[in-house]
Image (spheres, coloured by chain):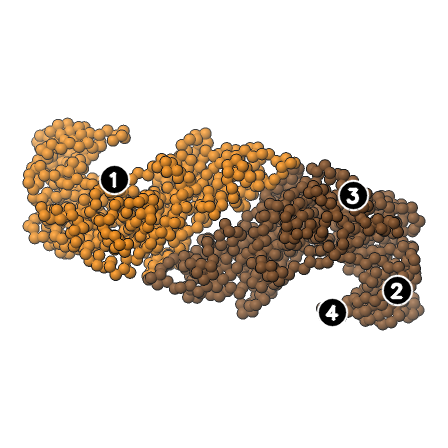
Chain colours: A brown, B orange
Amino acid sequence: MNDKQPTYTVTFLPANKSIKVKNKTSLIKAAQKAGLHINASCGGAGVCGKCRVLLEQGVLEGGNSEKLSAEEYNRGYRQACIAEVIKDITVRIPEESGRQKGGLGTEIPPRHHARMHVFEINDLKKAGIFYPPVEKLCLELPRPDTHDNRADLGRLIQGLADQRNKHRIITGLPVMKKIRRTLREKDFLVTVTLENPVNDKSKTHLLNIQPGKWDQRNFGIAVDIGTTTIYGVLIDLNSGKVLDKDSCYNPQMSYGEDVIARIIYAEKPKGLAMMQELVVDAINKVIANILENSTPTNDDEHGAIKRDEINSITIAGNTTMTHLLLELEPDNIRRSPYVPVSTFFPPLCAADLKLELPSHCVVLLFPAISSYVGGDIVAGVMGSGMYRTELLTLFIDVGTNAEIVIGNKEWLACAACSAGPAFEGGGITHGMRAVEGAISDFSLNPATLEPMNVTEGNKAPLGICGSGLLIIVATLFEHGVLNQSGKFNDIDSPRIREGRSGKEYVLAWQDECAADHDIVLNEVDIENFIRAKAAIFAGISTLLAQVGLEISDLEQIILAGGFGSYIDLDSAMTVGLLPEVDPEKIVYVGNGSLMGAWMSELSNHIRQDVVKVVRKMTSFELSEIADFKDHYVASIFLPHTDLSLFPKAIKRNRQ
Amino acid sequence: MNDKQPTYTVTFLPANKSIKVKNKTSLIKAAQKAGLHINASCGGAGVCGKCRVLLEQGVLEGGNSEKLSAEEYNRGYRQACIAEVIKDITVRIPEESGRQKGGLGTEIPPRHHARMHVFEINDLKKAGIFYPPVEKLCLELPRPDTHDNRADLGRLIQGLADQRNKHRIITGLPVMKKIRRTLREKDFLVTVTLENPVNDKSKTHLLNIQPGKWDQRNFGIAVDIGTTTIYGVLIDLNSGKVLDKDSCYNPQMSYGEDVIARIIYAEKPKGLAMMQELVVDAINKVIANILENSTPTNDDEHGAIKRDEINSITIAGNTTMTHLLLELEPDNIRRSPYVPVSTFFPPLCAADLKLELPSHCVVLLFPAISSYVGGDIVAGVMGSGMYRTELLTLFIDVGTNAEIVIGNKEWLACAACSAGPAFEGGGITHGMRAVEGAISDFSLNPATLEPMNVTEGNKAPLGICGSGLLIIVATLFEHGVLNQSGKFNDIDSPRIREGRSGKEYVLAWQDECAADHDIVLNEVDIENFIRAKAAIFAGISTLLAQVGLEISDLEQIILAGGFGSYIDLDSAMTVGLLPEVDPEKIVYVGNGSLMGAWMSELSNHIRQDVVKVVRKMTSFELSEIADFKDHYVASIFLPHTDLSLFPKAIKRNRQ
């Protein structure tokens, strides 16, 4: 670790495992990271008292509560969930806290998250495709005299041809209206802003003209309009560097959590205009925030970046978000046969959208494929480089709808899977988003079935988020608590009981958690989870079958979307959400939509290539493919009816 | 004559010449047309009493005044200037009215006006270039279903490709915003409005979409913004037919008669915005007038043409007029080295200019060559077909500035000559525009030097307009009243006297005219006239010399502009305004600027070709060419110092 935050070594006994953690890490997280189970229902609230450990060497901050007697505290007992590491320490997990099948040495499996693909400007530079859509050039033009009385605009255009090899320039009235004064203000030294051509057939737009030398200042913005969150990035288009980032909730949320609800709202009188106003206001807010106090990388002389120095903005979003932004009637997106108004969007100027950017600012929008494979996915395919790889790749963005793309540089097939909201905590009795108090990691004491709940923010549990749900189901299945159908095996444990929706596993008792009830996971929840993962896996299988390929042909998986970073790959393969592949072949690209928008700001080649890529992307309507149902039915098991697809699962079953 | 107005035969005795004239023609005009001089100073006021004729057969309307006794009237005497032809008649010109050198048989020379070039839509059709910039197409699109759920816009664009072979379509937000409803309003029967590509590299713009069948209605407007007058023509773009015309004064006139005065006004605070507003308001007024009650040629069903059915407008004007229309700072047009803001203008939409036309309406502006060879001249070169001819052609548009273009389809050279306002009556003591009361034709009784003044509107003379000035100078020179330097020879006549500006010829005495003074032409006036014609002839000679050619190489002359139709060709050659060529080789195209704009509305090829033509047109700044002064000095004689250029003049001189 290279950052300045101090790290400390924590050694766990009797396993004698040492790990390094950051200052103030909770001891329970340290144990989880070390792959050691500690009974801990309350997730950091310090109320269940089950996570006691013995501090044998060093000092901990906190760790005392009414669950410990003074004598116990003095002997070194601490509550792991409320104790924070501030020095190198040695800690013993007592038998009652770490009891495991086969004894104390048995470990919980480590978490494998996909390795993060980090977007680097240098990669673009090395590939020779660092070429922002908008550039600025400074020119000194010959002054007019009686032997050379060309018009001002003609003189400038000839200067671009002669000095910069820029040809086929076009411009509009705003530049023409100010060119006379501008040329003469600094004695024919001027800076022009050019929108570079998209392809051979396009012209170069002369967007703006400034007196004197300003070519060192050229800025762009990339925006992802998520259904939930809007992200913005401010980019120095000369250096490629990110100067600032910001995000805010999508204020349309108040009128509907998902796209369908928003479309319904937009169908009301003035609803569409209101949806547009909300998202535009939010983008304007994000822009205002990222501009505040931002300064360019290589020019201190002229100070902070001003709004009118933003020359381009690329926006990506799903098809509904893009329709609402452009005030296009989204009505038919939600009705069979799901016909959007358009899947490609012409370049606009900021004024068209009431964006608080200069009127010459170019607005680029990522094209979509269909009503449910939107510009966010196309941006992800472009941003992740999937469209340039030779490897047979599965790109998957998991949200309420999981969009999947399969292919490589030669061909691309895509589909949207109606996974339902299980991965976002929807349709799960105690499901919730990944905010404070959400159980996001879990392990099981196989002997007692006592849980170790790890929560977001180290707070008392409030519910279960998507990543937690995945790990809980995988863990319960791996330990034989659940059978292949997702039903509870007949096991006698205080943690398993008959509930209102079939049997249920109690993750936290009411008095241990922040909810006013026990937090449970029941068989209906598990069925919903299985249906969600089955929809995705069946989508993958169906798409592959359509192009005559099989799961085993996949050479790479790209995960995108917020959920992707939290997915424990082993759990995902255990339950059959993802195909079993070498985890090294899985990369996580984070917000693929934002990454694509951002790359588009740095490489005009994205704009050139995206037209071809979109044309290449064959969209499949899964519900229209007869095979899909078979694939789906085969997938509503843990991990699948066809175990040959899951060789590791077979191995586990044989053990 | 094919029109319905009756015509009558007038026979003049003793010359025994018969001509046909329209009903209500004044008898003095009939005599002038017959080439017979009648003394007539008062130009139709009926006050000089010199134009009395004897009606020998038939009936005249009017012709009586206090200048005739009852007995004279009863004998058949009439005053020709106030008598109108309403039947076939025979009239004798008595000796005292028609006295001529050599007796009554001597005639005044006939007037030769250039033959009118009439612009015919069929010529375009025959040449295969009838191809308006905007067309409308009706399409029936396949309806979406689950096997074909392409987006609305994609469906429409594919329909254009499949059904109409139209490719590379682009559109904007306004069409996208209404496409969903429009497609479904008439069950996927729609009419699209397309702006056709300018060249191979351009795309086809989808400008508008209407539900149902509307392709029979497609209209355009051509506008000429003259410094004095604004003309508009409404065109049915399907048939090519002109549906209506209108014109109005350019309201900028109130702020300056010529372009320099307007530029000076535009330099004042808010002056430019005001100049723009004035011209836009005037264009809007012309549009409103031509739209009133206009109906298309082939569609009565949907009634009168509405404003929002105008899909394109082409505008031509000189460089200053175009700058003022676009609100471009014209300041440097009037200052050496005369640098305009731009000589080419991007296609605009109506909203950019506040034209009261639909926002999708395409606005095309003719490009200019320089500050003083403007879009009006380029339009004239295009409209007259000069750019397509193989003949070495002189194009000349005479106004305050005479613009001249020499060349053919291979090359073009142009220049502006500062002729001064003499041809518009400026700088001439009693000069005036060609409005009521202006002496516009003239002949001389060689024995008495009594004039026959023919005035505009047959009213008492008020002054001399350009065409009159030309004929007066030519007539006085031909009859030896003026010498080659434009000075009066020593002739004793009550009509010739010493005035305040050298000798002068009295055209009308105060009591015969509408002015409160005698109307005269003096030597300073004649000098100004000679300077004006010399500037033009020297311009022609200089341009020709620059390209290594001579006057005698000219194969065709095209006259444009209001003045062109009034120029008596013999007079023009007599004074050395035009080179001596066979009058058959001279054509008059009328308002070349309007004709070019109009053709551009009917043939997109004009838009394609004009770019090349403009590139080909070499502009010469006459004041920068050393030879020009020599040519000018050689031209400030009647007709020229080098009489070999004027073989007919040599002949006359030898007689």
Residue A407 in view, yes or no? yes
Q: Disc 1 to disc 2, how far (Cα)?
A: 112 Å
Task: Give SS at disc 2.
Answer: loop
Rendered residue at 61%/40% (across/down) = B150
Q: Quadrant of residue A160?
A: bottom left
Q: Say yes or no: labels 1 and 4 on the same chain.
A: no
Q: What residue type is labelled 1?
A: Arg
Residue that mark 1 sits on: B115
Ranked by sequence position, the earlier of labels 4 and 3 is 4
Residue A299: percent from the left, percent from the top? 55, 68
Q: Which amino acid does label 3 sit on?
A: Ser
Q: Which amino acid does label 2 sit on?
A: Ala
Q: Is A476 left or right of B403, judged from the image as shown? A: right
Q: Disc 3 to disc 2, how far (Cα)?
A: 38 Å
Q: Quadrant of residue A484?
A: top right
Could you tell me which chain the residue with mark 2 belongs to?
A
Task: Give SS at disc 1.
Answer: strand
Q: Say yes or no: labels 2 and 4 on the same chain.
A: yes
Q: Say yes or no: labels 3 and 2 on the same chain.
A: yes
Q: Residues within 10 Å of mark 1 (few under 14, many from 20)?
A: some
Task: Looking at the picture, tell me which residue is in the foreground, A636 or B191.
Answer: A636
Q: Say yes or no: labels 4 and 3 on the same chain.
A: yes
Nearest-to-viewer mark from 1 and 2: 2
Label pair 4/3, CB-CB below 8 angstroms:
no
Residue that mark 3 sits on: A635
Residue A404: percent from the left, percent from the top? 69, 47
